[in-house]
Amino acid sequence: MYKKKKEKKEKKTQNDSRRLINFLRGRYRRVTTLADSNADLSRVMQQILARNGTSYSRVNDWAMMSSPIPTLAICLSYAYFSKVLGPKLMENRKPFDLRRVLITYNLLQALFSTWIFYEYLMSGWARGYSFRCQPVDYSSSSMGLRMARTCWWYYFSKFTEFFDTLFFILRKKNQHVSTLHVIHHGVMPFSVWMGVKFAPGGHSTFFALLNTFVHIVMYSYYMVAAMGPQFQKYIWWKKYLTTMQMIQFVMIMCHQFQLLFTECNYPRGFMIWIGLHGVLFLGLFSDFYKTKYTDDSKKNSAKKIQNGTSGGACMPVLDDNDSSTHNGVSSYTTIYNKEYNSCYSNGTNNGYVANNNITEKKLA
């Protein structure tokens, strides 16, 4: 009897040992699988961020490129100033008259965009870059370095665009500093930082090439619009500006996502990231275009400021010649709101709207 109990106990111990061994084997397999997955993930991240180490060393000593922290801090500070601090500082102050500043600013932005566009052409896109597949030149060749420097200046231009928002706040047009406007301007510098850091050249710079060309046209348009309603006859093509912007995003999407169906030695993750930018902005611009140009209910309120459903930015236009005679009021904001009801956009999705009756009267 005792012997049977002992054998039964030993058998149970053996079974427990087998279960423990099987459990440990299963855990080992899972750990091994996870380790392999992490190794694969590391390789994927390396492919996404930097296909080799040269990209990091080449730009590491450039301004704000050694770490993402400065860019992230500036973007967060911009968001805080735009939505909280700026409006609070202007709460008990009168709006500034910035018409001349706006003209100068938009002229400089147009010239800056022209130079960046030229550099993108001369450092690659007019010198043999492939529209089907263009790897990043991570070497220290003169053309590779020129392209990388151009990418950095494009990155810098995203910060100069912060002045778009600053001018709204200084003129107490806080309703135009929408959340989407702030997100657009706040996200772009960080996205471009990743491009300069890990892929300073190659396929996705097509996005920047198109974007700078559109900015040349866009800021030129804003500059003329800021000169006053009497100049709006020279910007009759304002409706087509939105169309051009939408075409830009369609081209970016097609150009980026074609790499999903072909082999190309370019960071796939960054390609997808840029392509998704095209999808997002195309949706915003399409919504604005539909609201502004195809909605019959909006046509009946053409004399009102149309800011689109995506809440982009709209900047006022004023003719200084009559700034002191309209209704005996000299306030920039008051005259704009009551007399001209015209605006132009430095945001992501708005065009120029003007009171045609006022314009005809002034042109006469």
Image (tube, rainbow, N blue to C red):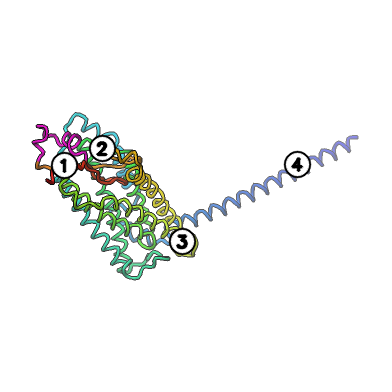
Which marked residue is nearer to the observer: mark 1 or mark 4?
A: 1
Which marked residue is nearer to the observer: mark 3 or mark 4?
A: 3
Which marked residue is nearer to the observer: mark 2 or mark 1?
A: 2
Label 3 is placed on what type of residue? Answer: Leu
Q: Cα distance, mark 4 to mark 2?
A: 81 Å
Residue 59 sits above or below residue 313 on the image: below
Residue 324's x, y, as percent?
Answer: 8, 36
Corner quadrant of residue 258: bottom left
Label 2 is placed on what type of residue? Answer: Lys
Residue 167's x, y, as percent?
Answer: 21, 41
Corner quadrant of residue 122: bottom left
Q: Is residue 32 magenta?
A: no
User: Would you name the residue on which mark 3 appears?
Assistant: 259
Residue 42 sits above or below residue 322 on the image: below
Residue 138 sits above or below residue 358 on the image: below
- In the rendered structure, find residue 16 and report the number of the disc placed on it: 4
User: Would you name the residue on which mark 2 appears?
Assistant: 304
Q: Cα distance, mark 3 to mark 1?
A: 47 Å
